[in-house]
Amino acid sequence: MRRDNQVLVLDADDTLWENNIRFERAIEGFLDLVTGPAGDRAAARAALDRIEAANARALGYGSKVFGQSLLECFELLRQRPAEPHEAGRMGELAASITAAEVELIPGVAQTLAELAARHRLLLLTKGDTAEQQAKVDNSGLAHHFQSVHIVAEKDVTAYHRLIGEQALAPRSTWMIGNSVKSDILPARAAGLNAVFIPNRHTWVLEDAELDPADTGVLHLSAFAELGEHF
């Protein structure tokens, strides 16, 4: 049965548009640079994941932090400072994640238009404020949302703050996203319902375990399916 007159809080990256696939392409370029044809790409990627996790906790997200992580990983693996041309290449790779046009996930534009006619829509995304706002502006989707919220981290505190600022009723509010770690678990801990829509390109550092017995989480396979439930 379709639920009408709900508040739908939507994630942006890898829920509305493709994002992490850009990082993955840049990382492949980095691995080409740092390992060469005979290097251990798996070990290099594991080292980068560790550095990215530490930098995300300390510095946040976005292309600048990503570029710093590439440089730190390069110098760790090579045990020397990067040469100017190497640092320049890593800078190009970091810049590439914000250079392309926003690539909407299939079904998003039409489904959002339908949902906006029946529900109150909010956008909640984490990352560098300027970079996230640019993606929102370039997506052509901003007019569907009553408000846009860009936060440093999507943790339980951020969800409680959103509930208070927007006077949300948790029982009729749903957080919709692709990340178990950032979209589903903290939203549920804050008392919201949740919709999990997996994306095969989701960042590995966003992985977490869902409780299969949690009836407050609706599992869908594609964004367009939201129209059948809301």
Image: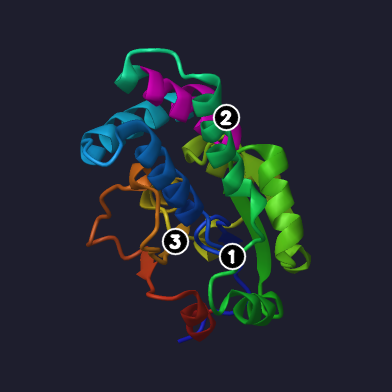
- Looking at the image, is mark 1 or mark 3 earlier in the sequence? 1
Q: Which residues are magenta?
A: 57-75
Q: Which mark is residue 8?
A: 1
* Spot occupied by residue 135 in the image (x, y as percentages of width and height): 68, 54
Q: Quadrant of the N terminus?
A: bottom left
Q: Nearer the viewer, mark 1 or mark 2?
A: 2
Q: Which residue carries the number 2 mark? A: 88
Q: Earlier in the sequence, mark 1 or mark 2?
A: 1
Where does label 3 land, which residue?
194
Marks 3 and 2 sit apart, C-alpha to C-alpha, by 42 Å
- In the image, what residue type sits under mark 2? Gly
How many angstroms separate mark 1 from mark 2 (CA)? 42 Å
Mark 2 or mark 3, which is nearer the start of the sequence?
2
Q: Is residue 65 magenta?
A: yes
Q: Identify the residue at image location x=49%, y=21%.
A: 58
Above or below 166: residue 199: below
